[in-house]
Image (cartoon, rainbow, N blue to C red):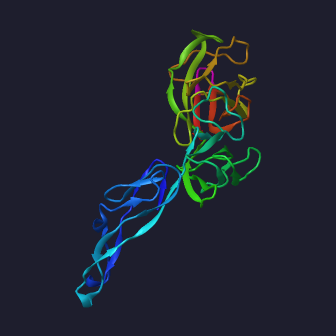
């Protein structure tokens, strides 16, 4: 019987009853009160046969009792039996922190929810050999090496470092397995499962009402132009807020309808500790120059577009064009307002 260190397991007894047609039945109650364990420093057993792990290692448990002798010719008299078996107490595996894949980039110091590597500890393991392995239904998403994919390794100590090499696509799809062989003993197996989260999408929070602007940097209310703000929340693949995550924006596919257009300036924004939202401000307040004259929002809004572009948001980096793409959208700017359409992950 296998038990993880610090846990327990019930050991029942089953036997065929030839006096009842050979049906396999549970005869555990015939052995209650007679359980014993050879080495109680490794495991103990109670009245009912519940085995509790004490420390990592192997021992044997025994019990005795009377049950049907399976001899119909003699009227099925009771017969004393003494079943026994192995008690193998394996180490429990624990991770020092959650794993996160940032597209191969280092995580910002402001992001503290997870890390790109984690130390796995075989709790209760002592001297001996530790053979580790990794497997996942999402492919090669983890490694014992920071530079290449290595899914098996052996250590002499009870810890190993696992590196994120990709992103999970389902909960607990990464299995970490261990075969621990104590010095002079037999292999004991343990497993644990986890997942590797990653940047994934933005969630719309709010848009401020269109307002008249006098200046844009900094914004001052007035009647020369217009201003509005969109607020987004940064989320991981498994829906967790990404507090302190870096981001950047990029503009492509720029089309100018009224020369010279407003111009586009991409920005990278460092993450802020404890903050998972960011606000993008769109503003135009240009002096009349004979080509484009901005104005406060009209009623109805104007329909003559000045320019448009595809805006892409990426998480995990402040460098323009670097990181994980999490959203694209079409910006169309007019003399008195802006529209944000075609939002896609």
Instruction: Kindly give the residue lying farthest to the bottom in the view shown.
Output: 73
Instruction: Kindly give the residue lying farthest to the front in the view shown.
Output: 38
Q: In this orientation, which residue lies closer to the viewer: 72 or 162? A: 72
Residue sitting at x 77%, y 45%? 147
Q: Position of residue 84 (x, y in %)?
A: 42, 68
Q: Position of residue 144 (x, y in %)?
A: 70, 48
Query: Would residue 218 be counted in the magenta stretch?
Result: no
Q: Tally the numbered discs.
A: 0
Task: Give the overall secondary structure of the magenta segment.
Answer: loop
Query: Would residue 335 be counted in the magenta stretch?
Result: yes
Q: In this orientation, which residue lies closer to the viewer: 265 or 215? A: 265
**Residue 313 visible in the displayed image:** no
Residue sitting at x 53%, y 42%? 238
**Residue 45 visible in the displayed image:** yes
Magenta residues (range)? 334-338
Residue sitting at x 74%, y 30%? 319
Q: Position of residue 116 (x, y in %)?
A: 66, 39
Say above or below: 130 vs 321. Answer: below
Say above or below: 295 vs 159. Answer: above
Q: In this orientation, which residue lies closer to the viewer: 109 or 122? A: 122
Q: Position of residue 301 (x, y in %)?
A: 54, 23
Say above or below: 184 vs 6. Answer: below
Q: Quadrant of the C terminus?
A: top right
């Amino acid at each position: 019987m296998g038990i993880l260190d610090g846990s327990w397991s019930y050991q029942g007894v089953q036997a065929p009853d030839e006096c009842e047609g050979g049906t396999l039945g549970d005869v555990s109650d015939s052995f209650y009160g007679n359980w014993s364990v050879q080495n109680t420093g490794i495991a103990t057993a109670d009245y009912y046969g519940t085995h509790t792990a004490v420390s990592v290692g192997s021992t044997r448990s025994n019990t005795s009792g009377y049950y049907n002798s399976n001899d119909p010719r003699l009227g099925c008299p009771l017969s004393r039996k003494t079943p026994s078996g192995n008690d193998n107490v394996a180490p429990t595996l624990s991770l020092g922190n959650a794993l996160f894949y940032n597209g191969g980039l280092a995580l910002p110091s402001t992001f503290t929810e997870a890390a790109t590597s984690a130390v796995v500890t075989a709790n209760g393991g002592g001297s001996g050999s530790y053979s580790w392995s990794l497997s996942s239904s999402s492919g090669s998403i983890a490694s014992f090496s920071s530079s290449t994919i290595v899914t098996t390794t052996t250590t002499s100590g009870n810890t190993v470092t696992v590196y994120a090499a990709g992103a999970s696509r389902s909960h607990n799809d990464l299995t970490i397995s261990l075969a621990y062989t104590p010095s002079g003993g037999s292999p004991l197996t343990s497993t644990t499962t986890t997942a590797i989260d990653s940047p994934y999408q933005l969630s719309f929070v709010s848009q401020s009402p269109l307002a008249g602007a006098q200046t844009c940097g900094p914004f001052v209310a007035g009647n020369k132009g217009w201003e509005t703000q969109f607020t987004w929340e940064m989320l991981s693949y498994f829906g967790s807020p990404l507090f302190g995550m870096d981001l950047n924006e990029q503009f492509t596919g720029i089309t100018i309808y009224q020369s010279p257009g407003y111009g586009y300036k991409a920005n990278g924004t460092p993450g802020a500790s404890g903050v998972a939202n960011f606000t993008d401000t769109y503003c135009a307040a240009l002096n009349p120059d004979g080509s484009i004259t901005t104005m406060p929002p009209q009623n109805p809004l104007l329909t003559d577009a000045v320019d448009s572009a595809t805006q892409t948001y990426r998480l995990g980096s402040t460098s323009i064009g670097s990181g994980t793409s999490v959203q694209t959208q079409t910006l169309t700017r007019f003399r008195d307002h802006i529209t944000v359409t075609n939002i896609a992950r």
